[in-house]
Image (spheres, grey):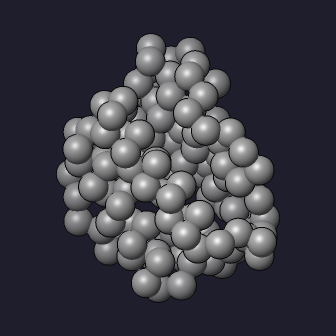
Amino acid sequence: MQVLRDDDFIKITFDEETKVLATKWKLQSFDDVEEDYVRSVITEIADGLASTQADYYLADQTNRGVVYDENMQKWVFSMLLSGGQRANLKKCAVVQSVDFFVGMSNEQLLKGAVTDIAYKCFNTRREAIEWLGVKDYE
């Protein structure tokens, strides 16, 4: 497994065998994180999807404890959708945050999405990995 980024905010990995690009958010609060930094990370994820030609995206948001404002939500979604389309992504599995409001904002955003990429929200990482259908992925 290749580590593309690992800092206090997020870990981004890519598994060549399973073609899974995975993100794991680490912070409950983004109080000390500038919006420009968040935008650079989201851009890196979108570019990572495209450059690795990932088939699957596993977004583990268990520890994400912040709700983006509406404009930021739309921007994040459009960036990730663009990266997924450039990669011909097959599936995107989102492991929901333990924060109720973050989970609801994810579901609301995804509900209105028009895309060929299959996506679904889950309560556990195991459920998400099983739905992606990748064997031997942890």
Give the residue at x 47% y 35%.
21
Query: Residue 44, how many percent across, how many down?
Result: 46, 49
Q: Which of the 4 quarters of the picture holds residue 13?
A: top right
Q: Position of residue 69 (x, y in %)?
A: 54, 84
Q: Is residue 85 above or below residue 134?
A: below
Q: Is residue 123 visible?
A: no
Residue 114, percent from left and from top = 23, 65
Q: Is residue 29 visible?
A: yes
Q: Residue furthest bottom?
A: 70
Q: How many marks?
A: 0
* 131 and 106: which is toward the camera: 106
* Residue 47 shown left or right of residue 33 in the figure: left
Q: Left or right of 47: which side holds 85?
A: left
Residue depicted at x 50% and y 65%: 39
Quadrant housing the N terminus: top right
In this rendering, is residue 38 above or below 102? above
> In the figure, 120 relative to 38: above or below?
above
* Horizontal relation, residue 24 to residue 42: left or right: right
Residue at 39%, 72% (x, y): give it.
75
Report the front residue among 114 and 43: 43
Identify which residue is drawn at 57% across, 78% down. 68
Quadrant occupied by the C terminus: top right
